[in-house]
């Protein structure tokens, strides 16, 4: 039974995420040109260099911090979503009784 609830939470989350992505893309189309959006969603100059030149010497510390901060923020948002959804599901079960 718990796996079914987890699956429902996952599908609810996936549906919510898809709706949010569609809303954001619609808003972006009103602000940015198609060429700008194409470059933003399909960048050409990304990834790791196989053999970086000696002049690069790695990323500055502040750049690493930004990526870690973004990851931590996303994790926190997902945990917040999960906890709020658990509370909603508990309330729904109580109301059905």
Image (tube, rainbow, N blue to C red):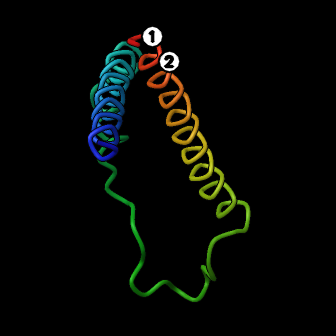
Q: Are marks 2 and 1 in contact (CB under 8 Å)?
A: yes
**What residue is at 65 percent from the left and 64 percent from the top?**
64
Is 12 located above or below residue 49 in the figure? Answer: above
> Disc count in the image?
2
Residue 8, picture quadrant: top left
Q: CA distance from mark 2 to mark 1?
A: 6 Å
Residue 61 on image: x %, y %: 73, 68
Residue 67, picture quadrant: bottom right
Is 20 located above or below residue 35 in the figure? Answer: above
Is 54 located above or below residue 37 in the figure? Answer: below
Is disc 1 surrounded by few (<14), some (14 to 19) or many (20+) residues within 10 Å?
Answer: few
**What residue is at 43 percent from the left and 16 percent from the top?**
92
Q: Nearer the viewer, residue 2 or 82?
A: 2
Q: Nearer the viewer, residue 14 or 47?
A: 14
Residue pushed farthest right?
Answer: 62
Residue at mark 1: 95
Residue 41 on image: x %, y %: 32, 42
Q: Left or right of 67: which side holds 22?
A: left
Give the numbered dot on residue 19.
none
Residue 30 on image: x %, y %: 36, 12
**What residue is at 55 percent from the left and 35 percent from the top?**
83
Residue 22, picture quadrant: top left
Residue 10 on image: x %, y %: 32, 39
Give the numbered dot on residue 91.
2
Quadrant the N terminus occupies: top left
**What residue is at 49 percent from the left and 21 percent from the top?**
88
Q: Nearer the viewer, residue 40 or 87?
A: 87
Q: Secondary structure at mark 2?
A: helix
Quadrant the C terminus occupies: top left
């Amino acid at each position: 039974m718990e796996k079914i609830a987890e699956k429902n939470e996952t599908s609810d989350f996936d549906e919510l995420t898809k709706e949010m992505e569609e809303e954001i893309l619609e808003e972006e189309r009103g602000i940015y040109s198609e060429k700008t959006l194409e470059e933003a969603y399909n960048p050409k100059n990304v990834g790791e260099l196989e053999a970086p030149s000696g002049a690069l010497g790695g990323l500055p510390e502040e750049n690493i911090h930004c990526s870690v901060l973004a990851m931590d923020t996303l994790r926190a948002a997902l945990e917040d979503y999960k906890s709020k959804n658990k509370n909603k599901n508990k309330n729904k079960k109580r109301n059905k009784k």
